[in-house]
């Protein structure tokens, strides 16, 4: 088993490694580890059938303990043009998170110029130095637990706790030991990082944690390096939203919305 994988399989269970550690507590699963595994469950249950996932919504019902977990998946609807798939993450007999994925039939349509997705491309990542998600990049020979420490960052702007950030990100780890990440599961792992990139300093010991991840997918990423442009707004009632545009080497990939709750840091 590789330390740099998030999970290894043991029968029907997925056993988390220390790479899944959450920044909120080392006894909990990182949101990216949850959304990545839920994406894996959706993709395994609904293999290539001429459709593609165009939207995935992850509800994070409760803190997910770092214990062996299993997935329960089923079709809510299986049609010719669209299918809807549900995947539940079960830990210690309780449902801790759920993903609902919408798949649509792939069509070959010639679009007029006005209908094409136009996105301003971020600066070339080849010209930006690499840092880590939590500051300096960890030494290649040093293993540090937690998914945040498996992320390489090429910062463009922000990421200074003022509610916005723009950076190229790359995750070095495999989701499942012995299996290559697919573009869909890789996007699932990345989809939780907008809140961290666009984190707003609230004051005191408070921080914003997301209770969901809703991913509208234009297409699957074609490159390891994906640029996230995140903006966060927080309301005085104690909740808010982070919205993130995802761009790869060929243009826009999709948008992620995360619903935020303000709470004291730690559990």
Image (cartoon, rainbow, N blue to C red):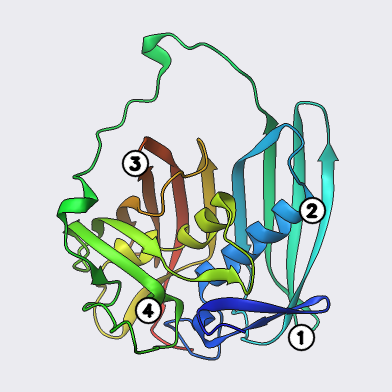
Give the residue displayed 43% in from the left and 68% down from the top. Answer: 172
On residue 92, which mark appears? 1
Task: Residue 96: tell me if it is visible.
Answer: yes
Q: Whole-percent x and y of residue 156?
A: 18, 55
Q: Nearer the viewer, mark 3 or mark 1?
A: 3
On residue 45, which mark appears? 2
Task: Residue 234: tell me if it is visible.
Answer: no
Q: Earlier in the sequence, mark 4 or mark 3?
A: 4
On residue 249, which mark appears? 3
Mark 2 residue crowding within 10 angstroms, few (<14) / some (14–19) / many (20+): some
Q: Secondary structure at mark 3?
A: loop
Q: Nearer the viewer, mark 4 or mark 3?
A: 3
Q: Secondary structure at mark 4?
A: helix
Q: Earlier in the sequence, mark 2 or mark 3?
A: 2
Q: Is residue 117 left or right of residue 89?
A: left
Q: Earlier in the sequence, mark 3 or mark 1?
A: 1
Q: Is residue 262 above or below residue 156?
A: below
Q: Earlier in the sequence, mark 4 or mark 2?
A: 2
**Callout 4 touching callout 1 (CB < 8 Å):** no
């Amino acid at each position: 088993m590789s330390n740099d994988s998030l999970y290894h399989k043991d029968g029907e269970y997925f056993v988390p490694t220390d790479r899944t550690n959450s920044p909120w507590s080392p006894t909990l699963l990182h949101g990216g580890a949850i959304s990545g595994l839920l994406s894996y469950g959706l993709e395994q249950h609904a293999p290539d059938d001429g459709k593609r996932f165009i939207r995935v919504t992850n509800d994070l019902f409760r803190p997910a303990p770092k214990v062996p977990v299993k997935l329960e998946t089923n079709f809510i609807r299986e049609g010719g043009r669209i299918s809807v798939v549900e995947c539940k993450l079960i830990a210690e007999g309780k449902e801790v998170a759920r993903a609902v994925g919408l798949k649509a039939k792939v069509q070959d349509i010639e679009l007029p110029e006005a209908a094409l997705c136009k996105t301003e491309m971020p600066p070339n990542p080849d010209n930006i130095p690499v840092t880590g998600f939590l500051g300096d990049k960890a030494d290649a020979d040093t293993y540090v637990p937690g998914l945040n420490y498996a992320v390489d960052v090429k910062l463009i702007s922000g990421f200074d706790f003022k509610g916005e950030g723009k950076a190229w990100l790359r995750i070095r780890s495999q989701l499942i030991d012995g299996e290559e990440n697919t573009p869909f599961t890789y996007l699932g792992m990345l989809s939780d990082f907008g809140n961290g990139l666009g984190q707003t300093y609230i004051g005191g010991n408070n921080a914003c944690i997301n209770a969901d991840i809703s991913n509208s997918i234009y297409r699957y990423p074609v490159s390891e390096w994906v640029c996230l442009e995140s903006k966060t707004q927080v309301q005085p009632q104690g909740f808010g939203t982070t919205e993130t545009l995802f761009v790869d080497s060929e243009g826009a990939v999709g948008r992620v919305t995360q619903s935020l709750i303000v709470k004291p840091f730690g559990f």
